[in-house]
Every structure is written in structure tokens, then in C-alpha cells.
Amino acid sequence: MNHTLSTRHWLLIFTLSLLTFVLGTSEFVIVGILTEISSSLGVTNAKAGTLVSAFAITFAITTPLVMSVTSGFPKRKWMLSLIGGFILLNALCVVTSNFSVLMVLRMLSATVTGVLISLAMIVSSETMPAPKRGIAISFVFGGFTLANVVGVPVGTVIAQSFSWNGTFVLTTLLGALAFSFCYFVLPSKLSQAKSSLKDQLPLLAQPRILLAFFIPALGFSATYAVFTYLVPILKEMGIPGGSISLVLLIYGFISIFSNILAGKIASHNPIGRLRWVFLLQAVVLMSLFFTTEHLVLGLVNIGLMSLMAILLTTSTQLYLIDLANMYQPKATGLAASLMPVASNVGIALGSALGGLVYHAGNLSFVPWVGGVLAIVASALTFISFYFDQKHTRTENVAM
């Protein structure tokens, strides 16, 4: 059997990566343009910030539900329809001048984004040779990394130079570009497993699935407990205000390599490897408590933190899909939606826990929060690995 990736495979990977880049730019750019939105629409910065939390909450709640209800939809037509909806919602953001309307549009965009991300992961998993699934999914996840490194800064500059509405002109045009590629590249014959909510929802009661869900949730929590407050940490290190954006840019650039390594980890015994990845991440995060007193060591440590940040993505995405195939084969669509949901839950949890320590006046102890969360993620991964080994032994005995 040929396990190499053909030109058509790579074209599909590029197309799905472009789609996640567009979706990621639209999701994350709002953080960079909140000030422009608040001043333009006459709301406080705090109220404008609810656009971020409302997006994350809507994403987490609606994505699994919509994936369950639409599991029998033809994937190609459904994805093209959703991208069309994405374009329309972003175009409406261009012309709106009302905060409440903008909030509704962003919440609808969250649902569309969550479902499209999940579908992109399913397509990349189903259409690639089995040994290359990890590489394919790591590239598709790479679209989000590139969105933070390129899409968000460009969108922010547009908002600062023209208006925040102009940023949504960018995301609308990017959506049209993604639609064009998807129209010509997405395969017409994709799996279409019709199943009811009754068939799908029992997956969420499966203990192994719940255990697997909290692995990426805690992994992202570990990173974002620190990353959310990286700017004040950099200021305490003595980094000049004008240089902080450069540090953040380098941080984003390093995370590209994290994404590449994520595909390598997923290529063989991913859960076994992740056990040690999380422990190493804990050491890296906790080290910040000591290294931030030294500028060079602190910056190197932050670079290592970026390198560790998303090593878990590809492995946990594939793991959830594989567990669904094992316990609830008709619910792979729902399973594919759980990793993006877990990341949003993890980001919210990590930011909140880090914030509790920071606002108590203990910024230097924030890295310990991240380290402890990474250790808990490792413990859950050890437990999952144990159950995997036990299942394999049971299968071998039964043969």
C-alpha cells in the first residue's frame, strides 16, 4: 500500500490549512482591535472584551451540538455552505455600527468557525494515508499558528490605519479566497455516516472520551495561565514597551516549529510520548519563576515555552477520533469537535487561574500555576496510556 502523499493530497492539505488560517484570523484578530471597537461604538473596553468571551463560550457549547445534528450532511456541500455563511457574517460586520448586532454576528461566527474546524480535521484525517494523518493534521492546525503570526498583526494594522470595520473587509476577502480553493479542491466523495443524536451523545458519557478531552484542556490551560499575562511578565523583565511586540512576534514564529513537532510526535505512540512532553512543559513553565530575573535566560525560557505550547494538538485530535471509532463509530464527527472545544475551555480556565494569582499581587507565581496544570495533564495522559495498553493486551488475548 502506498503511504506517500501525492500532489493532490498536498493541495488538499494546503486548502484546509488556508481555511483554518482564515478562521483563526477572524477569531483571534478581535483581541487586537478591541480598543478601536470600543471607541467607535461608544462602549467601554471591558464591554468590548465580552466579544472575546462570548465567542469562546458559543464556540464551546454549539460546536458539538451542531456537529451531532448535522452528522449526516454531505461534507463538501455543508462545508461550502458554512464558508458562504462565514463570508456573509464577516461582510455584515463591515457595515454594522451597533455593538449588540456585532455581538450576535460574532456568536454566529463562533458556531460556523467551530463546525468548519471540526470538519476540516475530519477531512484531513479521512483522506490521508494512515501513517501520514499526523503530518496532515499538524499542517491544518498550522493555519491557526500562522493566523496569530501573520493574520492578526495585519488585521490590527488595518484597524489602526483605517477602522476596525476594515479588518472585517480583510476577513471577508480571505473567506472568499478559502471558498474558491475549497470549491475546486474538496473531494466530492467524503464519508457520510448518518446518525441521530441518540447515536452520538452517548460518546460524551464514555469515561475514556472524557479523560481524553481533559488532556488537551489542561494542556492549553498550562500554556495560557502564563501566556495571557506574558506582557506584564516581559515588562517586569525590563523589556522596553516598544520591543514587546517584537518578542511576541518571535514567540509566534517559534510556535510554527511547535506545530511541526506536533506532527512528528503524532506519527508513533503519540499518547506515550505526550506523557513526557507535559512533564517537560511543566519544567519549562516553572523555570520562568527563576529565569525572569535574567533577561537572556528569561527570553530563552519564553522561547522554549512557545516551542512546547502546541505539541499536544495533533496527537489529541487523532486520539479522540480513534477512541470514537473504538467506542462509538457513528460519533466521529462529534469526537472531532472536542479538541477545538477543549482548547477554548483550556484557554478560559488557564487565563482565569493565572488571573487569580496575578490579581492577588503575585505575578512571579503565575508560572507555577502553568506548571501544576501541565503535571495534571501528564497524569491524565499516563492514565490514558495505561488503559490503552490494557485494551491492547485484552485484544491480544482474545485473538
Image: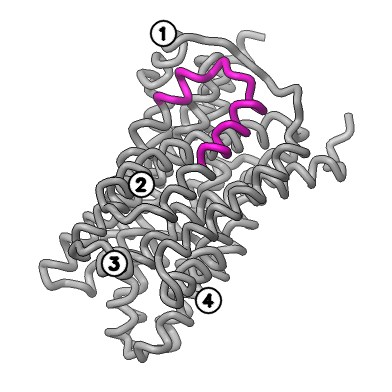
* 79 within the magenta span: yes
Residue 198 is tagged as 1
- Residue 136 visible in image: no
Which residue is depicted at the point 61% across and 47% down? 19
Mark 2 neighbour density, 10 Å: few (under 14) some (14–19) many (20 or more): many
Mark closest to the chain's N terminus, 3 or 4: 3
Give the residue type that dot 2 points to.
Answer: Leu
Residue 218 is tagged as 2
Classify residue 394 as left or right of residue 27: right
Mark 4 neighbour density, 10 Å: few (under 14) some (14–19) many (20 or more): some
Disc 2 to disc 3, C-alpha distance = 37 Å
Mark closest to the chain's N terminus, 3 or 1: 3
Mark closest to the chain's N terminus, 4 or 1: 1
Among the 4 quarters of the image, the one containing residue 36: bottom left
Discs 2, 3 touching: Cβ within 8 Å: no
Comparing marks 3 and 1, which lies closer to the viewer?
3
Give the residue type that dot 4 points to.
Answer: Ile
Q: Quadrant of the C terminus?
A: top right
Instruction: Report the number of numbered marks.
Output: 4
Disc 3 to disc 1, C-alpha distance = 46 Å
Q: Secondary structure at mark 2?
A: helix
For the record, the magenta segment spans 65-86
Nearest the viewer among 146 and 298 is: 146
For disc 4, the marked residue is 250
Nearest the viewer among 109 and 166 is: 166
Disc 1 to disc 2, C-alpha distance = 29 Å
Discs 3, 4 touching: Cβ within 8 Å: no
Mark closest to the chain's N terminus, 4 or 2: 2
Which residue is depicted at the point 60% across and 54% down? 174
